[in-house]
Amino acid sequence: MKLIVANWKMNPNSQKEAIQLFNSLKKSLKNLKKAKIVICPPFVFLPLLLKASAFALRKSGLAFGSQNCFWQEKGAFTGEISPKMLRDLGVEYVILGHSERRKIFAETDKIIAEKLKLSLETNLFPIVCVGETKEEKKRGKTFQVLEKEIKIALKKVPKSKIRKVIIAYEPIWAIGTKNSCSPDEVLTAILFIRKLISKLLDKKTAQNMRILYGGSVISQNAEEYLGEKNINGLLIGGASLDVKEFLKIVKIAQSF
């Protein structure tokens, strides 16, 4: 089953638009059997959408995720949201370490590792984003970057929880640039990640771990990625805000 994650980022601007967008999607996302769809709206829309879709979620392949979380359960951390708060809402997934969080908000590998640890303790499915910059790619450091980010992220993860971890390979140079990574490059990176997981843990864990691709995914290139058995799904940004475009991608996912 392919996993399709919709990262709405800081969109849309109103509750009304969020409801309209979700309802437009919900009408067509019924009885999904070959794909799991995770909607990740801004924090403020999560209670609204979860309340509006409680019944529908029980009869579909839909779930909700958060775009981020904090690394502490509670306390004097103004503006932050804890994994426990998310779980209490009914959220099942959380995106961690997105390149925008790393670059704009200076999140380090160690911070992401702490978030991952607490997310797992709270019974969330964490989607850990890893990937290289354009400069790192030019210098041939893609594998070095992936190894460092993954090693640090997984360092505090108990083996009993590793099955819940999802990795999203998102080359930073491809995000929001309309310059998507070629399927061959994606497959090479993902096979490297699986080999690394096999070394860090074991072969079975490496084979079973869900690894997604994200970075300028649109309906025209989605089939090339989803057709690869080692690519378990997609993390989608801009295209997830276009109902027709996103549904085309879901339809493709359903065909595998």
Image (cartoon, rainbow, N blue to C red):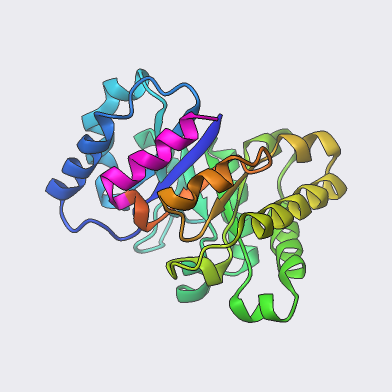
Q: Residue at x 41, y 48 (%)?
A: 219
Q: Residue at x 29, y 23 (%)?
A: 56
- Above-or-below relation of 20 to 182: above
The question of residue 220 being in magenta is answered with no
Camera-side residue of 104 and 239: 239
Q: Residue at x 73, y 56 (%)?
A: 188
Q: Position of residue 86 (x, y in %)?
A: 40, 42
Q: Quadrant of residue 160?
A: top right
Q: Position of residue 104 (x, y in %)?
A: 45, 75
Camera-side residue of 23 and 229: 229
Camera-side residue of 178 and 58: 178
Q: Quadrant of residue 2?
A: top right
- Above-or-below relation of 68 to 232: below
The range drawn in magenta is: 241-256
The N terminus lies in quadrant? top right
The question of residue 253 being in magenta is answered with yes
Q: Position of residue 201 (x, y in %)?
A: 83, 43
- Above-or-below relation of 158 to 27: below
